[in-house]
Image (cartoon, rainbow, N blue to C red):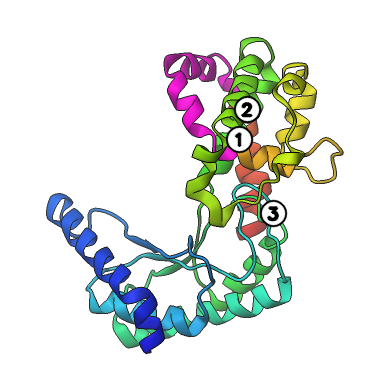
Amino acid sequence: MRAAAGKFLLAVQEAGRIYRHVESKKGAGNFVTEVSVDETDTPQTPVELFFILAMIAGEGIPVQTIAPKFTGRFNKGVDYVGDLVQFEKEFDEDLSVIAFAIQEFGLPATLKLSVHSGSDKFSLYPIINRLIKKHDVGLHVKTAGTTWLEEVIGLAESGGEGLQIAKEIYVEALAHFDELTAPYATVIDIDKAKLPTPETVQGWDSEKYVNTLRHVQTNADYNSHFRQLIHVGFKIAAKMGPRYLTALEANEAIIARNVTGNLLDRHLQPIFG
């Protein structure tokens, strides 16, 4: 208990302060509250999760989703790296802990486990599917980053100005590597030696760029280091302003096809189907 409090109590108390501030502005019941403790150096055990939920209840936070850090690597935009058997054991225990905490502490009955970064963890989806059905519970999966990557894939696939924008995003992201990657040090593994040079990327056609970025591990061109850098490079697109947004609108059909196929066929169906 002392060890868990030493790690998490101050953070949960701050979460309580933030919740009450938001509640004062929006009103109780008008927003969904998640508490996330995933971007830490070490994973939480199911016992630590139990104490975190006890602290959350003590702060009076009506938490709807809780995002712990699981064993293994949940890097941005790429598949899980770790022991699948150990993950299954801990995920199963975490779901049991949540069910018990709901009863013991009066937390919302709809409290769900949340998986960050949940996108592209293809090797975990059969396990998660089986366990949420076993426990008859819901699940929250954070997938925002993979949609941004599908935007870039769609732009590259469209050719012309879209492909040029996709190339520029990579070149600028590489030039600002340290600035972009520092905030995500615990959730990315990028070997700079395995990143292509700007000159190389400028010579790519649409097919080469798309195959390098799209998460198909059996494709010889796929580069997880390239993909992770683009994942954290969204600020580059933001700085492009209207130019980037205009390109999205001009290539809406291609981008929509990529986004829909990725989320529906590769995420929602395997997790919940």
First-in-chain label (1 vs 3): 3
For badge 3, the amino acid type reads Asp
Q: Which residue is mark 1?
A: 230
Do labels 2 and 1 touch, CB within 8 Å? yes
- Magenta stretch contains residue 180: no
Q: Residues within 10 Å of mark 2 (few under 14, many from 20)?
A: many
Most frequent secondary structure within the magenta stretch: helix
Q: Nearer the viewer, mark 3 or mark 2?
A: 2
First-in-chain label (3 vs 2): 3
Q: Residues within 10 Å of mark 3 (few under 14, many from 20)?
A: many
Q: Which residue is mark 3?
A: 79
Q: For the C terminus, which image quadrant?
A: bottom right
Q: Secondary structure at mark 3?
A: loop
Image spot of residue 265 (x, y percent)? 67, 45
Q: Is there any visible trace of residue 71 in the rendered image?
A: yes
Q: Foreground: 34 or 109? A: 34
Do labels 3 and 2 touch, CB within 8 Å? no
Q: State the separation of the CA atoms marked 3 and 2.
A: 21 Å
First-in-chain label (2 vs 1): 2
Q: Which residue is mark 2?
A: 170
Q: For the N terminus, which image quadrant?
A: bottom left
